[in-house]
Image (cartoon, rainbow, N blue to C red):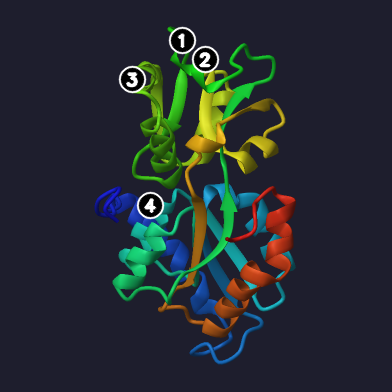
């Protein structure tokens, strides 16, 4: 992952919590070795922007009882690296799944959805364009560079003239480790604007969108993979298949995601 550097190791307390969660998950599966789905628990680690769609899909999934866990894609990848129990990894980019695949920790990833970046602002905001983010006094919140939404945001800013980019960057008051935290700060009134995914802005009742020009849009693709250490490979594979071309796709469309390219 050249654009973000190595995956950061989790703090011991976070790792311990992840391991405890994992121990209560796939190990309860009635399927030994993953020969057949049904009756077990499937742990799905998903990027926070997937919360609504994956939760809905998981509740209707018949192959196993789905136990989703949502966070920044970098944190979830680190959990898998450090041995936390998981069956499926769904990331807001393709870099983290690709890295885990190279390390032999997941099966070959597949792209299952696309998204777009948007500037979210509170309803009635005076911010109407990307250029308004450069005005003095604007409080802007963006994603940390270690998470996909932060990396995508920097792609957008990197395509601006130097002066405009620097003025916008000077207004950044916070860099968050997941897109849900950006939305929360906007809803709490702690910021005037934030770069989020279109899907997150749509799901936030008190926010409205400011369009990012098409020529500045990054290529936002989501990757999913079965974790090789899964105790129920058949159910995990069924879940991924449905996410790529099944009921999961319907839930993704309903949440505002675009089809995979």
Q: CA distance from mark 3 to mark 4?
A: 26 Å
Q: Between residue 207 and residue 35, name the one nearer to us.
A: 207
Q: Residues within 10 Å of mark 1 (few under 14, many from 20)?
A: some
User: Mark number for residue 74?
Assistant: 4
Q: Are marks 3 and 4 in contact (CB under 8 Å)?
A: no
Q: Which residue is at 33% across, 64% downward?
A: 99
Q: CA distance from mark 3 to mark 1?
A: 11 Å
> Residue 66's x, y, as percent?
62, 68
Q: CA distance from mark 4 to mark 1?
A: 32 Å
Q: Which residue is at 61% across, 51% downward?
A: 51
* Location of mark 1 (residue): 135
Nearer to us: label 3 or label 4: 3
Q: CA distance from mark 2 to mark 1?
A: 6 Å
> Residue 229's x, y, as percent?
41, 78
Q: Residues within 10 Å of mark 3 (few under 14, many from 20)?
A: some
Q: Which residue is at 56% across, 25% downward?
A: 186
Q: CA distance from mark 2 to mark 3?
A: 13 Å
Secondary structure type for disc 4: helix
In this picture, residue 51 sits left or right of residue 227: right
> Residue 241's x, y, as percent?
62, 75
Q: Which residue is at 56% across, 87% downward?
A: 31
Secondary structure type for disc 2: helix
Nearer to us: label 4 or label 1: 1
């Amino acid at each position: 992952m050249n654009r973000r550097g190595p995956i950061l190791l989790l703090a011991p307390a976070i790792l311990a919590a992840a391991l405890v969660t994992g121990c209560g998950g796939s190990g309860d599966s009635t399927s030994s070795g993953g020969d057949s789905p049904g009756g077990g628990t499937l742990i799905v680690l998903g990027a926070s922007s997937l919360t609504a769609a994956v939760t809905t899909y998981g509740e209707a999934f018949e192959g196993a009882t789905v136990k989703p866990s949502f966070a920044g894609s970098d944190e979830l990848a680190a959990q898998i690296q450090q041995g936390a129990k998981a069956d499926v990894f769904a990331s807001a980019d393709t870099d983290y799944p690709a890295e885990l695949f190279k390390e032999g920790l997941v099966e070959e990833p597949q792209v299952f959805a696309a998204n777009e970046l948007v500037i979210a602002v509170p309803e009635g905001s005076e911010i109407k364009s990307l250029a308004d983010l450069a005005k003095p006094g604007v409080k802007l919140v963006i994603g940390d560079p270690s998470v996909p939404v932060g990396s995508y945001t920097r792609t957008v800013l990197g395509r601006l003239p130097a002066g405009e980019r620097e003025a916008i960057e000077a207004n950044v008051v916070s860099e968050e480790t997941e897109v849900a935290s950006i939305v929360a700060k906007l809803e709490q009134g702690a910021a005037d604007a934030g770069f989020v995914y279109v899907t997150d802005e749509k799901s936030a009742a008190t926010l409205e969108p400011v369009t990012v020009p098409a020529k500045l849009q990054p290529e936002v693709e989501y990757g999913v993979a079965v974790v090789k250490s899964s105790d129920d490979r058949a159910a995990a594979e069924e879940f991924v298949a449905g996410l790529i071309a099944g009921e999961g796709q319907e839930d993704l469309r309903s949440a505002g995601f675009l089809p995979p390219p």
